[in-house]
Amino acid sequence: LLSFLIVGARAFTVFTTNCSAPTSASENFVTSPNTRGTLEILWSSLFTILACTWAIQHPNIPEQDQDVPLSSKRGKLWRQTKGFLTKAKWMLITVLAPEAIIMAAVSDLTIARKYHKKLKALAEEDGVFWTWTHTYHANMGGFVLRGLNGSSQDSGERTTSYRDPYHLGAPNLEALRRKGAIRLPDVSESDITDRCKNDAFVKAIAVIQIIWSLAQAIARISLNLAICPLEISVAAFAICALIIYSAYWPKPMGPERAITVEHDKANDGLGEGFRSALKEAQDPDDDRFPFCTDILRGRVRLATKLITPSKTLHETSQGLGREPGSPFQPDHVARGLSAFAAGVLGAILFGSIHLAAWNFPFATNADMMVWRLSSLYTVAYAPAAILVGLVLTAFDLDSWATVVQGGSTLLYILARLVIVVEVFRSLVFLPPSTFTSTWTTNSPH
């Protein structure tokens, strides 16, 4: 592939911009120059991509390590290092497949919408305050039960072994409360948001940067100025990020400590009612399109294994790598129509935006062809893989369907990597009008 992209050797040249400065102190206002440099394009694009891939992450509650106190220096360092590595991993996955994060965000929103009214009604019965933030916090493993082991329904029954702490999701919380095993926690919204790293203001700053990048692209199109492939890719990330932010807005960002829920041991809280409530609180989304959703979920699994190959993931009804009561993994994506549709539409949207650079001037015809084929594949990947998979499944060729899922996902990742290489390679082969700035230079960004 690299040899296919090699062009003839040419001397590396630098054009030095030299703008005139005011000649006296009588000038009250000096406008920005009407040009921009290669590094200005690069840095503004990279900062926007960071806002779309790093700042947008809403990780779930991390594991509450009982052996490392969170207040100690060792605990803080361990927590910060683990959190950084987790966000870095998911930033890379977002770069390769941002529609997977759209899928997860819509999945979270679907679950929250389903259980918010139920939990709010139960909260009114318990006389406690309940908001969307509470529901999202519950759905990210923010409420835990402690001290479950050693309790039994009666003295003659063998004690059931539970994780300690036992992380509850929104379905668990609703089922346990309905069974009378717990009362909903009396926690204010500020108690939850105070545990978070960022607030609405920080989110708003990131959204402003994203909107600025879209405004710059629109302004350049209206003025018939060239746009580089990197800016097209940034626009694709920006639109996906706005969708993700709209779904994640009520969700707390980066809370590190879970809230303990009091349970009633005297009221059979750890007996049959507890076990039956947890058993019935399965994946809240439906499973009308299992293979279709597996195509998109498989991309998350494969990308995760490529980035962290030493870690084996097991898929359960509670999400990838999740055992009952364990901390929620950030790759939790529910099955169902809503998550499936969001993933497919996100993939098509992301690829379609890259097709806007179909007739852009590239360094060689080979570069142009590689860009076109990669962009077309990112658009056609999900619909084609699902269609072929459904046909193979209908003829009981499940093993071939698995091959299609794995092979098409590998090709998708390769196509995305090719696009990433091309957007940075094209920076040294831009037409002159690319370096003419617009009015967006004078706006905050």
Image (spheres, grey):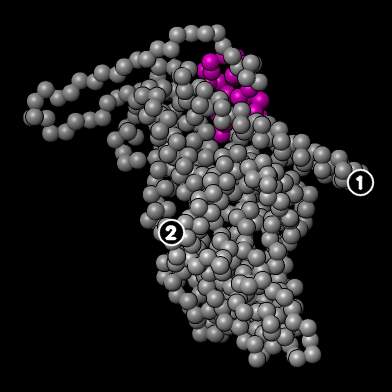
Q: Let me know if residue 363 is in the magenta part.
A: yes
Q: Residue at x 59, y 29 (%)?
A: 419
Regarding residue 138, the answer to whether it shows in the image is yes
Tell me, yes or no, whether the two marked residues, 2 and 1, touch with CB atoms within 8 Å. Answer: no
Q: Amino acid at mark 1?
A: Asp
Q: Is residue 275 left or right of residue 365?
A: right
Residue on which the image places disc 2:
197
Indicate the quadrant containing the N terminus: top left, top right, bottom left or bottom right: top right
Q: Is residue 338 visible?
A: no
Among numbered discs 2 and 1, the one appearing first in the sequence = 2
Considering the whole magenta stretch, tell me its main secondary structure. Answer: helix
Residue at disc 2, secondary structure: loop
Residue 39 falls left or right of residue 356: left
Where residue 42 sits in the image (x, y, percent)? 42, 30
Q: Neighbour class for label 2 at 10 Å: few (<14), some, many (≥20)?
A: few
- In which image quadrant can residue 381 be found? top right
Residue under the point 11% across and 30% down: 27
